[in-house]
Image (tube, rainbow, N blue to C red):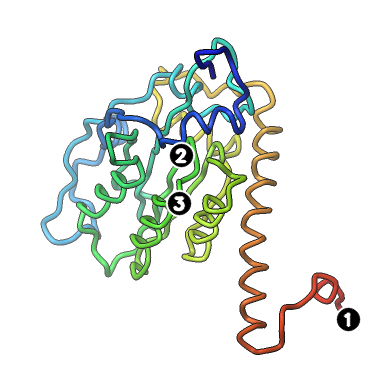
Amino acid sequence: MCRAGGCVPEGEQEREAEHLRRPPLLLLETRVPARAAHDAPAEGLGAHHVLPRNTMNLLKKEIFKQQFGNQHRVPQPHYRRKTYLCYQLKQLDGVTLDKGCFRNKKQRHAEIRFIDKITSLNLDPNQSYKIICYVTWSPCPTCARELVDFINGQDHLSLQIFASRLYFHWIKVFQRGLQQLQAAQVSVAVMTRSEFEDCWEEFVDNQGMPFESWDKLEQYSESISRRLQKILSRSNWNNLEDSFRDLRLGSPSPSSLRSDSR
């Protein structure tokens, strides 16, 4: 990414520049691409509920590669990496009921717009649904809390979030947001080649071209995944410490947990 004084690394410098959490952006329409649209009533959405026809604009190939790229540094020519959220709403049998893509809008992050959209569908609480989200940046603390509030009490919804990159992952409040999602039974993971391929097929105007990996995609994904696992494992450790405190036994030491009679 470039600033007034020149180009800087993607890490702390780049994400600090984006910390105002992604400026006013436009909404990408939120419907299934025509090639996958369902015109018949979708079961489980409630009585007399029919999904509207698709009006979603597919992402351009260049936009996808730039914005979903998981490189540690922005490749040249330098550009600003923004927030995109692409989602699929599915029945448990795999049938896609709805999907779309959001970017941030003024004072409305992509995650909040996604919540608004799913809420507007009035899903039948007696049916079970699976939602898969692909995001360029992991959620900020505020959006993480909103997602937790959204999913809590909705046992008929299963939410999976796959992030291409971690947003301010070294700051504790951002780590805590990811930990809260995990505690709320929201699956948080890093996008691998498989997720990039699915995103390419479902949300990109790929013109029939297969997904082509960029250099070191797998290496970057594994590195980011290790960071995420460290963050989430700290949450498990803290929960265990809290449990011991509740029992008035004090906090366990790492060495005592590692010792196993077996």
Question: Residue 155: x percent and y percent?
Answer: 37, 69
> Which of labels 1 and 3 is toward the front?
3
Instruction: Check the image and report above or below for 242 versus 116.
Output: below
Q: Earlier in the sequence, mark 1 or mark 3?
A: 3
- Disc 2 crowd rating (10 Å Cα; few below 14, some 14-19, many 20+) is many
Name the residue carrying label 1: 261
Q: Mark 3 — residue?
A: 141
Which residue is the extreme one toward the left? 48
Identify the residue shown where x is 62% and y is 45%.
170
Callout 3: SS: helix
Q: Position of residue 202 (x, y in %)?
A: 40, 33
Viewer-closest of 37 and 57: 57
127 above or below 6?
A: below
Q: Residue 84: horizontal and vertical position, in percent?
A: 40, 34
In the image, 75 versus 28, the foreground residue is 75
Residue 218's place in the image compared with 159, above or below, is above
Under mark 1, the amino acid is: Ser
Q: Are the residues at dot 2 and dot 3 in contact (C-beta closer than 8 Å)?
A: no
Q: CA distance from mark 2 to mark 3?
A: 15 Å
Q: Which residue is label 2 attached to?
A: 135
In the drawing, does residue 10 fall left or right of residue 44?
Answer: right
* Residue occupying image coordinates x 48% and y 26%: 81
Q: Nearer the viewer, mark 2 or mark 3?
A: 3
Image position of 95 (left or right of 238): left
Decide if residue 36 is on the left or right side of residue 148: left
C-alpha separation, residue under disc 2 versus residue under disc 1: 43 Å
Quarter of the image for residue 216 reads top right
